[in-house]
Image (spheres, rainbow, N blue to C red):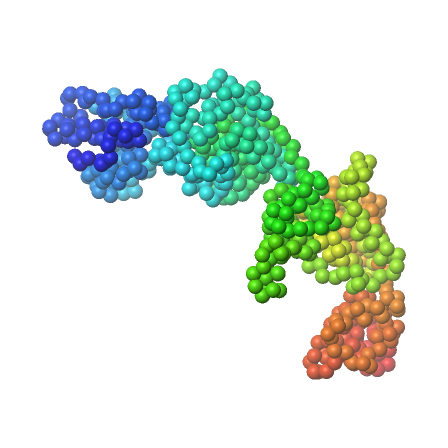
Amino acid sequence: MPQALAESPNSPRLSAFSRLDDLLAQADDAVTTGRGAHGPLSRPPPRPSWEQVCASHGAWAWLRTRYGLSDIELDLVLLALAPEANLRYGRLYGCLQDDPARGRPLVGLAMDLLAATPEERLAVRSAFGPQAPLTRHRILALVPDPGVAAPPLLAHAMVLDDQIVDVLLEQPGLDWRLASCCRLEIPGPEITRPEVPGQADQAEDAVGRETLAGSVYAAPAAPPSWAGPYGGPVRWYAQGPEEADRDGPARELAARDGRPLLTVETRCLPDDAQGAASMLALAFREAFLLGAVLCVDDLEGLDRLGGERLPRERTLEGLLAGHNGDVVITGTRDWQPGGRYVLGVLPVPVAVCDIAERRALWEKELTAHGADTGPADLRDLAARFRLGPRRIADAALTACATARRRAAADAGQWVPPRLTRPTRAELFASARGQSGHALAALAHRVEAVHGWDDLVLPGDVAAQLAELRARLAHHHQVMDAWGFERRVARGSGVGALFSGPPGTGKTMAAEVIACELGLDLFRIDLATVVSKYVGETEKNLERIFAAAADTDAILLFDEADALFGRRAEVRDAQDRFANMEIAYLLQRMERHDGLVVLTTNVRRNLDEAFTRRLQFVVEFPFPGVVERERIWRACFPPRAPRDPALDLGRLARDFRLTGGSIRDAVLHAAFLAAADGVSIGMSHLLMAIGREFQKLDQVMPGRLPDGGEG
């Protein structure tokens, strides 16, 4: 029989393979002497013994102690490990199994090598039972022979799990299968799996907290004040909104003990429940092998896998019960384990960073990139955007990169970072880019391009909008710094109703406010919200408000009377459910902390309870002659060619149109003039005005219905 390994068998790393070489040599001797693999004489135990192997190799000692493996089970692990260490073993297995393509040992070969009597063969076979350690803990996988239909157990190949392979071969790093859904943060320059210090460190303590033998960092001898119940492993549920630093407790826990942090991103798990469960099990064992604090990020990410509570109760809670390391789970909603296991999960509320913390984070991150930002910009960034530490860091980096690119384009060459400074617009744009992603899937983002100069409104209406803008701009100062939030019985958000005829500037006013404050504006598409099925409308609205709660965007309900209509007298079930929707909206708007703008053409169509709960009710009147002339002039861009004979004052006096109709008429006239190859003249405007009156189903003043002069 050829020698399997050329290295010295006396090396501690190869002592286990020395035992395998001795075992194979005994089998070869039995065959060559004519006795067969199972001769009448008992074979001596292979050398070295497992006691000697474990004494010189900590990884084998850890495996034996952690899973309570017998000598036969350790031999099976060694047989499966050998092809991973040296391909010569694979070729040898192929020869022994009369098939060179079979480089993995079959169960039948293991029985031939390890068993000399029928009783020993049964003992080897029992090692593959469903409750045996090798299969229950997923140490070994049995792969059926693809060339055999319904193959027996003996025709299954033994494949060692990659995590166990890495431990026994002392390979550093994260299991490659977890790379797509896990993130490993290590305290030092590299991570290894050193040998176990000794047998005394391999026992579990009396209260259930394991010393993590074979891991990178041993657990502390005495449980600190932040340990889990009764000194056992930590079980925390960090609950808070997405913008909160929910994984902060896990990072703090890992930093206090100087251990790695392994984070499982649940939304990156496989889509099927079985694949996700297998990946979670691998992550739990990887955390144990590395001695890492495990963070299961975003509990809601498991809801999409096979039902609402199935993955939680049957997978996550079962893994928690069998794990002796520290685990932190993060989520948004309230959660308590189902009671199938005694877990001792401690809820840990995590709040969003307050304005002072956000300002300090912005200043720290921008200073780190050499950007000197004024105090006013820092104050406004912290007040307008409720971002967490990581998103602030990302936004600051994006803003600085944008500033460097702009400076390089202006200078025509590379500019040192210290000479660039992000503008206010660049800072606000990068901050907006960090929020609103969930809301963008449920609503339409409105590009806010209009400014105050584009709004033509009476003085009192403009003053009301200015008050609304000031309320939003100084929200944190009044509610937080001055303590008014504790005096407000309902939510601290702002609700505004814009009512008036179509085209009077209601939607434009919402755009202007969003543009002035540097916030995103999302228009809610009622077609995706309203459902004929009972309860679905409320669910759709809850998703929108929940997504908006984690952003700082303005919600715009255009034509709000479709949702916020008057409650009717209950005559049938349809009336009752419609009234329930309105009642839900009343309650949900009160709990929302941001700005919600409702627009309607007829104010009386809305339920009176809404107007009582709104902070601003702004009536947009039909524009008068003076306002119409200002709108006519504002609709022409500076570069648009105009006939000097244009009489915009006459158009304002003769044609009673709203701002929206005037804007459409100017644009239509521009296309007519472009088609004629001339400047925009009165004939083009009169033609466009006629089309507007046709759209309104009205007769154009001063003209006959057929378009002739009147």
If the image is split into quadrants, where does the C terminus sit?
bottom right
If the image is split into quadrants, where does the N terminus sit?
top left
Q: Nearer the viewer, residue 363 or 137?
A: 363
Residue 624 percent across, percent down from the top left:
88, 66
Q: Nearer the viewer, residue 343 or 377?
A: 377
Residue at coordinates 77% horizontally, 69% vertically from top-left? 635
Q: Would residue 567 be found to the left or right of residue 400 on screen?
A: right
Q: Would residue 322 be found to the left or right of residue 49 on screen?
A: right
Count of marks overlaid on the render = 0
* Residue sitting farthest toward the top: 206
Q: Nearer the viewer, residue 679 or 664?
A: 679
Q: Would residue 688 be found to the left or right of residue 210 on screen?
A: right
* Residue 361 seen in this snapshot: yes
Residue 128 occupies quadrant: top left
Residue 30 percent across, percent down from the top left:
15, 27
Q: Nearer the viewer, residue 4 or 338?
A: 4
Residue at coordinates 65% horizontally, 55% vertically from top-left? 421
Q: Would residue 256 be found to the left or right of residue 81 on screen?
A: right
* Residue 562 seen in this snapshot: no
Residue 230 percent across, percent down from the top left:
56, 19
* Residue sitting farthest toward the left: 34
Q: Is residue 683 above or below residue 154?
A: below
Residue at coordinates 33% horizontally, 36% vertically from top-left? 159
Residue 436 percent across, percent down from the top left:
65, 49
Residue 166 occupies quadrant: top left
Q: Is residue 513 above or below residue 183?
A: below
Q: Is residue 620 above or below residue 32?
A: below
